[in-house]
């Protein structure tokens, strides 16, 4: 009768301890068995640093929004300043119109904008501008009317701007100031009225302004365009 068979000491065991031992020998630690409770586990983020970072980001965004609002307000103020004075607006529109016209005519010239009293003042200076002045300033008068129409069409308001080209009006103003002063002195001395040559509205206004500053005389306009003229009369 044979002796009972005993399992060999070298037999490989299928127990969990043996599998863990093999994994450890191979240099890879064994992983624990999954726990039923761990299948639904949720890893919660750490709130401390994240909250501080979020607050910092929100603070930066708020500052950026405030800066944007300040920039918008500055732009609005600049626009309001440029649009406060209608005479400045008239000059800007007239300057743009004349620049385009000079380009079309291929005429060199710079445009100066100003406000004189209750009128916008626009001047074209430099270059050869005689063609824009014409005989006795006739072309200049027509160009001024065209510019006024362009401004009125853009602004919706009738324009009384003054246009000068090549300092023609400035020189004419000086000549008329001298003429009016001399005429006023003669009328004061003689007591007799004097009629001046026909003038355009700009020229007549220059004469009226000079006469108004001289004691003992006054001035009136008579006649119809283009033959309307100034009459200087002694005061009664």
Image: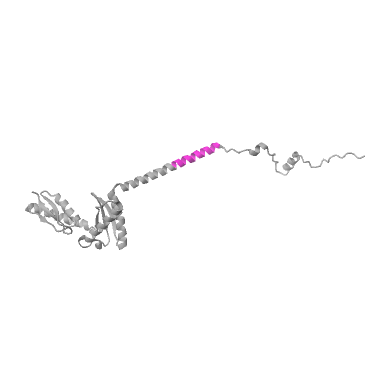
Q: Predominant secondary structure in magenta?
A: helix
Name which quarter of the figure residue 169 lies in: bottom left
The vertical placement of 13 against 104, above or below, is above
Residue 193 vs residue 9: left or right?
left
Taking the spot 20% from the left edge, 61% from the top edge, the residue there is 136
Residue 61 at x, y = what percent? 46, 42
Find out whether residue 51 is within the magenta segment.
Answer: yes
Image label count: 0
Colouring rule applied to residues: one colour
Residue 35 at x, y = what percent? 68, 37
Residue 59 vs residue 21: left or right?
left
Taking the spot 51% from the left edge, 37% from the top edge, the residue there is 52
Find out whether residue 38 is within the magenta segment.
Answer: no
The vertical placement of 186 against 26, above or below, is below
Residue 69 vs residue 225: left or right?
right
- The one nearer the camera, 28 or 4, is 4
Range drawn in magenta = 47-63
């Amino acid at each position: 009768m044979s002796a009972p068979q005993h399992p060999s000491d070298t037999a490989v065991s299928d127990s969990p301890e043996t599998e863990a031992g093999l994994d450890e020998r191979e240099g890879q630690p064994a992983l624990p068995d999954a726990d039923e409770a761990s299948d639904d586990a949720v890893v919660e983020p750490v709130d401390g640093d994240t909250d501080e970072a979020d607050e910092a980001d929100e603070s930066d965004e708020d500052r950026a929004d405030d800066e944007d609002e300040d920039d918008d307000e500055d732009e609005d103020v600049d626009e309001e300043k440029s649009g406060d004075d209608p005479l400045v607006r008239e000059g800007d529109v007239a300057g743009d119109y004349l620049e385009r016209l000079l380009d079309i005519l291929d005429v060199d010239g710079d445009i100066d904008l100003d406000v004189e009293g209750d009128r916008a003042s626009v001047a074209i200076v430099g270059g050869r501008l005689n063609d824009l002045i014409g005989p006795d300033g006739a072309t200049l008068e027509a160009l001024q009317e065209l510019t006024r129409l362009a401004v009125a069409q853009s602004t919706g308001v009738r324009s009384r701007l003054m246009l000068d080209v090549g300092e023609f009006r400035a020189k004419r103003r000086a000549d008329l100031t001298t003429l009016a002063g001399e005429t006023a002195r003669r009328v004061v001395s003689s007591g007799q009225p004097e009629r001046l040559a026909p003038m355009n509205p700009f020229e007549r206004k220059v004469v009226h302004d000079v006469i108004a500053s001289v004691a003992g005389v006054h001035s009136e306009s008579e006649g119809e365009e283009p033959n309307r003229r100034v009459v200087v009369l002694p005061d009664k």
